[in-house]
Amino acid sequence: MNLTLKIWRQQDANTKGKMVDYPISGVDEDMSFLEMLDVLNEDLISKGEEPVEFDHDCREGICGACSLQINGEPHGPDRGVTTCQLHMRMFNDGDTITIEPFRAKAFPVIKDLIVDRSSFDRIQQAGGFISVNTSGNTIDANAIPVNKHDADDSFAAATCIGCGACVAACKNASAMLFTSAKVSQFALLPQGRVEATDRVLNMVRQMDEEGFGNCSNTGACEIECPKGISLENIARMNREYIAASVKK
Ligand code: SF4
Ligand code: FES
């Protein structure tokens, strides 16, 4: 395939960015989107030009690093996949593809297509953990029975990889789907109830402080989430938040 890539180039957070056109040829439909960018970068390096900076690590849908806005959609046109799992067979010969970083005030651009998502880390640090005794007298995990439905829903929430696609998809740049997944994975388990009140209050406070917008129930986050995190988690977090606010 021969393609035209329109890629966002930006030197750093304080420099104005712009879209730059790059023609690319010989793209195989079995390549992943990131492999296609590798080919582009090898070509740029061989010509003495600066390669396009983009984020990646696992390249198998686990780490959440490969945050790219492709033709206006987080992780591109496929469903239930991250950018590293997106294949070039989703595009046609002659296509023009726009590639931008995830856009949100709380995700400042570091360079080109790489954004700083440490705001997510700070939300997690505000309450996304449980305190357990690991000093040698821990109780066996199976000693506390957990309802099967709750265990399944908790596991589903825990599959969130923190990629930020939900924020990039949202017209308000809301982080409610991410935060609610992190609240839900603990809220559904007895081990998570001990700190539940402080957890939801602190994580929501941190989310607001980071500059994410509010949820207006558009549902774009759920559609674009590569892990199928459900909007039900936002409803659960709202219930947790109201109950915690009354208690405090
Ligand atoms: S909820 Fe989905 S889209 Fe949002 S950070 Fe988690 S995995 Fe990514
Ligand atoms: S590189 Fe890890 S999820 Fe894509």
Image: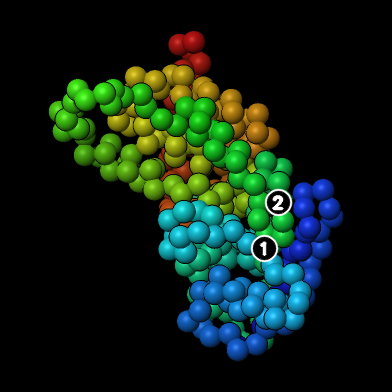
- Residue 79 appears in the rendering: no
Query: Percent from the top left, x then y, of residue 2?
Result: 65, 87
**Badge 2 vs badge 1, beta-carbon distance below 8 Å:** yes
Query: What residue appears at the point 64 percent right and 47 percent down from the top-left corner?
Result: 116
- Compared across the picture, whether 44 is left or right of 126 comes to right
- Vertical placement of residue 146 versus 156, above or below: above
Between 229 and 11, the residue placed more toward the observer is: 11
As measured in the structure, the alpha-carbon distance from the residue carrying label 2 to the one carrying label 1 is 9 Å
Query: Percent from the top left, x then y, of residue 85?
Result: 47, 67
Q: Which quadrant of the view contains residue 27?
A: bottom right
Query: What residue appears at the point 70 percent right and 70 percent down from the top-left corner?
Result: 51
Q: Residues within 10 Å of mark 2 (few under 14, many from 20)?
A: some
Q: Residues within 10 Å of mark 1 (few under 14, many from 20)?
A: some
Please give the residue where the numbered disc 2 appears in the rendered image. 110
Say what amino acid the circle numbered 2 marks: Ile
Query: Percent from the top left, x then y, of residue 115?
Result: 66, 51
- Vertical placement of residue 122 versus 8, above or below: above
Dot 1 falls on a residue whose secondary structure is: loop
- Compared across the picture, whether 10 is left or right of 226 comes to right
Dot 2 falls on a residue whose secondary structure is: strand
Please give the residue where the numbered disc 1 appears in the rendered image. 53
- Residue 102 appears in the rendering: yes
Q: Disc 2, ligand 2: is the CB inside 8 Å?
A: no
Q: Which quadrant of the view contains residue 195?
A: top left
Query: What residue appears at the point 50 percent right and 66 percent down from the top-left corner?
Result: 84
Query: What residue appears at the point 53 percent right and 51 percent down from the top-left corner?
Result: 163
Say what amino acid the circle numbered 1 marks: Glu
